[in-house]
Amino acid sequence: MMRRSVLCLLALVVALLLLNGCRKDDPRTSEVQPGTNAPKVQGFYLLNQGAFGTNKASLDYYDAVAGIYTRDVYATNNPEQVKALGDVGNDLQVYGAKLYAVLNGSNKVEVIDLATTRSLGKVDIASPRNIRFAGGRGYVTSYVAAGGATGEVVAIDTANFTPQWRVPVGREPEELAVIDARLYVANSGGFKKPDYERTLSVIPIAEQRVAETIDVGINLELVRVDAHGQLWVTARGNYAEVASSLYCLAKDPATGKYAVAKDLQLPCTRFDIRGDTLLYYSTAYDATGKASSTFGMVNVRTREKLAGKFITDGTETEIRTPYNVVFQPDGGNVYVLDAKDYKSSGELFAYSHSGRLLWRYKTGDIPACIAFVGK
């Protein structure tokens, strides 16, 4: 019995040594700062978009407890997948015990086991853009065909990964939000310049049809809901005399319908919301095509821009091409994703709540979005 115990102990020590050795020697893995100041967060997956046609979408994972960042975990855990994750990662969401990666260029939604990062299957959808969930279904916006007469929202069964129904919406739909069993879909019309779309399509889920449209602004993209039940929507404008802007939509208590409550007349490229704070950045281009980005904050309760800067240590000058900004839920860090030159590795910047840089790490090509994993 004593000999057997000793042998088991030796086997365990060897296994631990091998594990530590692999971690140190693995060029995909590095130790960064552990801890997120958010006790409910284990870590997150980061989806790298990859340039169109390069088939270089990839998935990274950050273990926030151990402080370990690992690149390209999907390809590592699915070696039989010839094309790995696919082409152009556009959205990433967690629902239940599964991770859903929207691959626009590969015309699919990849379904992944959250714990093992093994592929569970896929849903074939033409040019999918974004996905949200409610009541056991996923709802995916689809361009259907570039420049087509309409786009679609496709409802998929999260148990068997099959489409259940489709609803035509405006051209080139982008993000969508779910509130009170209704889908609010941002239509862009992005391939029909100068004839852009300017409405949200409203779909009562039980009715499986567009019940109304809400006029907002030219070339819509992002739509999110805050803690007060307000919708925040971005319009990209026409890239000329009509600038991009950020809109707040509120519900009329009498009718129960949303309408524009305020046009903040604030250029906004991407944003995220936590509590009463909306954090955004705006990227503008000069006559030579050189880009410059500005970070700012809005109080969603008062609908007013806040004074001061989010990044307080001056390191925003080291962010070359911001591509997304993400609040960690339940407090903790704030992440800025930097696409750099769109051709090579990007970079992830982790900031404290006070706007000071905690750490930075190299990602795959064009880091696009983050999906958090709870403990």
Image (cartoon, rainbow, N blue to C red):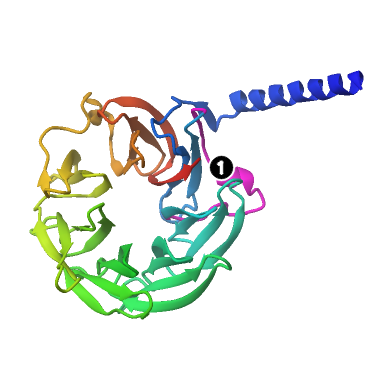
Q: Which of 249 and 90 is in front in this view?
A: 249
Verify whether residue 215 appears in magenta.
Answer: no
Residue 190 vs 66, above or below: the answer is below
- For the N terminus, the image quarter is top right
Q: Residue lying furthest front in this view?
A: 254
Q: Which of 291 and 44 is in front in this view?
A: 44
Q: Where is residue 251 in the image (x, y as percent from the top left)?
A: 17, 65
Q: Which of 256 and 266 is in front in this view?
A: 256
Q: Where is residue 43 in the image (x, y as percent from the top left)?
A: 47, 38
Q: Give the range drawn in magenta.
A: 66-90
- Three-letter residue code for mark 1: Val
Residue at the location (41% across, 50% down)? Answer: 51
Of helix, strand and loop, which one carries label 1?
Answer: helix
Q: Name the residue under label 1.
A: 73
Q: Is residue 340 visible?
A: no
Q: Answer with the quarter of the image where residue 126 lies.
A: bottom left
Per the picture, the main secondary structure of the magenta-coloured stretch is: loop
Residue at the location (45% across, 38% down)? Answer: 41
Q: Where is residue 190 in the image (x, y as percent from the top left)?
A: 25, 66
Residue at the location (37% across, 78% down)? Answer: 167
Q: Position of residue 250 (x, y in %)?
A: 16, 62
